[in-house]
Amino acid sequence: MSAHWKTHWKKGVRTVLAASLVGALTAGTAACGLGGDDVAEAEDNTVNIGVLYPKTGQYAEYGRLFQQGLDLAVDEVNAAGGVGGKTLGLKYYDTQSDPKQDASVAPKLASDPSVIAVVGDYASPASAAASPTFQQAGLVHYGFNNSSPTFTQTGDHVWSPAIGTDAYERVYADAAAQQAKRVSVVYIENDWGKQAYGYFKEQAAKNGTQIVYESSYLPDSTDLSPILIPARDADPDLIVNIGYGPDGALVVNTLRDKLGYTGPFFGGQETAEFLDLAGDNAEGAVITGSFSAEGTKNKGAQAFVKAFKERYGNNPGNFEVTAYQAVKDLAYAANATEPTREGIQKALQTVTDFPLYQGNDTTFSFDQETRRAPGIEPILLVVKDGRFVPYEN
């Protein structure tokens, strides 16, 4: 076959394949009953919440837990009639909870007219990188997991129902003071970790607790022996870790398995990942939280626990409930006003009975100065027999 004939033959094949593909796609679309007009109508009848979350990367466990709570809540909202007669959807964006990726994704969400609000990310520094873009677009950024008290300072469209880091660390330091006069503290080296440790240190001083050793560590650390050896050798009554789940497991495993520390430990997070990574070393670990599936007296939370367990086969934890509540809050806002960006913002400014699944109260409202939810108190949890249960001093 000559080169000239080969060229014409390839062009002909490509033409036939292209025509066949178009025909197949057209037939497939028609068979599904989703012609152009139907697709446009379906899109017009759907509004979305944008989701910034870590589906992959070192914080992927939190993304998995968030998605379980978010998906359950959206299904319940739509089963109850949706928002303002429209279907509520979720548009997920995997950011690995990395500030650079959050900042890169934010313009896509801001320019999407179907998105009426955004939730996430996991880490406050990552979330804060996206907030200015949403603020400029008049798009509510609902940082349901962002406990940093400074998170909402970007502007009036940035909100958070999360308990503040200052409240968490006050409770943490008070619990430490109940069983220790001398503590060693290690904390994750990022904006949140430094801020959290500052609050802990301030409350410890008020309690008369002596911090005999302190050190930060990088989020991607793999060997913490250089800082944990002096933490152990400072002869503390208690070692405290202020960080996330994976690094909490690394800290306690190093202390127990490598360094022979047998004293009390505060640290970790309420995730299956922490329990799996730490194994038997997790036993007795104390953490702060906002919710206990086994201890809640909140009727709405009890119904959530039942629905979650029926769907996923296990009890939910703090990360699942806060994600679930975020969707419920925003759906409530949309139904109180209208399912638009303007409607969500107006509701957050005026509605005083948002549904609450943390603590004993059943509703909450926002402080309009801070755009946070005051009055939701942290609780303490402890690992007992391989699961987190309410902790009693």
Image (cartoon, helix red, strand yellow):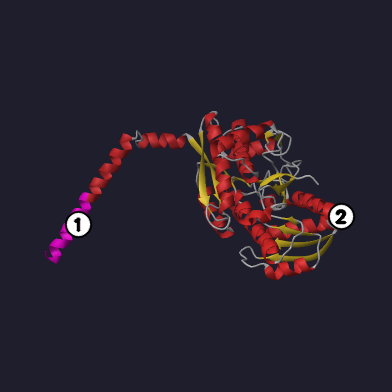
Q: Residue furthest bottom?
A: 226
Residue 217 on the magenta segment: no
Point out residue 319 in the picture as x, y percentages from the top left corner: 63, 46
Indicate the secondary structure of the residue bearing disc 2: helix
In this rendering, would 207 be left or right of 93? right
Residue placed most toward the observer, 183 or 156? 183
Residue 10 on the magenta segment: yes
Indicate the secondary structure of the residue bearing disc 1: helix
Point out residue 53 in the picture as x, y percentages from the top left corner: 56, 50
In space, the residues marked 1 and 2 are separated at their CA atoms by 81 Å
- What segment is highlighted magenta in the picture? 1-16
Quarter of the image for residue 95 reads bottom right
Query: Would you name the residue on which mark 2 appears?
Result: 207
Residue under the point 50% across and 45% down: 91
Residue under the point 65% across and 36% down: 347
**Quadrant holding the N terminus:** bottom left
Residue placed most toward the observer, 300 or 282? 282
